Image (tube, rainbow, N blue to C red):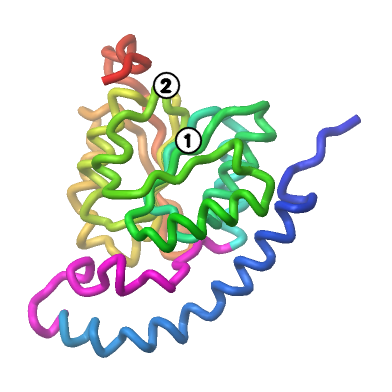
Amino acid sequence: MLKQCALQIEPVRGTLVRLHAEARGDWVKFLGITPRYLAGVLGGRKMHEVITPSVARDIYMPVSPEKGEFLYITARAIGARTIVEFGTSFGISTIYLAAAVRDNGGGRVIGSEIEPAKQARAAANLAEAGLGDFAEVRLGDAMQTLRDVPGPVDMVFMDGWKVLYLPLLRQLQPRLAPGAVLLADNIRSFRSSLTEFLDYLHSADNGFHSVTLGFGDGLEYAVYLGNGDDADATAPQ
């Protein structure tokens, strides 16, 4: 008998339908913070300095259903058992990733969310989807909460504050398994902010092969080829 995809059965399917429907109201919430954003930009401040986690605490900023499906099938294709997620928000992307881990036979998604209300909601949404045993959402600054993730890490999904993409990648890199996949969202929208991050991935000196996919507002797809020091990747640091 063929094994059924977790995304197609309850309670995962129903939870995702509800969350995506709720997230469609984000545009109204963005309108409410637009004056703050424009005032900040005109005052010379960067976006992450204006739209702080507390300001965005009610905004989903989710992956689309199509991008969620892409996360799921990528994790399934590589048999990912340990996945790290930066920027959990309300846990929509986490559900897609945790469903893949479940269908791969077990493992864990380790996410990070700095806003307490979102972290609590994400944990509740994972429990509602029946995936609480396959994911945890750590509360706090990702540079701290993801410092001690166990290796080898099979997959990383980045969808948080863009200024942390490169430092977090460097922090996680010693724990990446050869062949690990890194997906990073919003590449087109924040390309100027992500120049150093993309240069790092596209350089032949850093152990990655990477391409920007024309998916939504841009999705970076990188494969970690290794750098000769991967024997230490599984050791706690």
Q: Report helix, strand or loop for mark 1.
A: strand
Residue 28 got which mark? none
The main secondary structure of the magenta stretch is loop
Q: How many marks?
A: 2
Q: Secondary structure at mark 2?
A: loop
Rendering coords of residue 217 (x, y %): 42, 64
Q: Nearer the viewer, residue 235 or 216?
A: 235
Question: In what quadrant of the picture does the C terminus appear?
Answer: top left
Region in magenta? 41-64
Residue picked out by circle 2: 152
Question: Three-letter amino acid code at disc 1?
Answer: Ile
Looking at the picture, how far across and down is residue 68, in whole percent?
58, 54
Q: Residues within 10 Å of mark 1 (few under 14, many from 20)?
A: many
Q: Nearer the viewer, residue 13 or 138?
A: 138
Residue at image location 26% in from the left, 68% down from the top? 52
Name the amino acid, label 2: Pro
Residue drawn at (57%, 28%) of the image = 107
Q: Is residue 198 visible?
A: no
User: Which residue, as the protein is rendered here, is positioned at the far top?
Assistant: 231
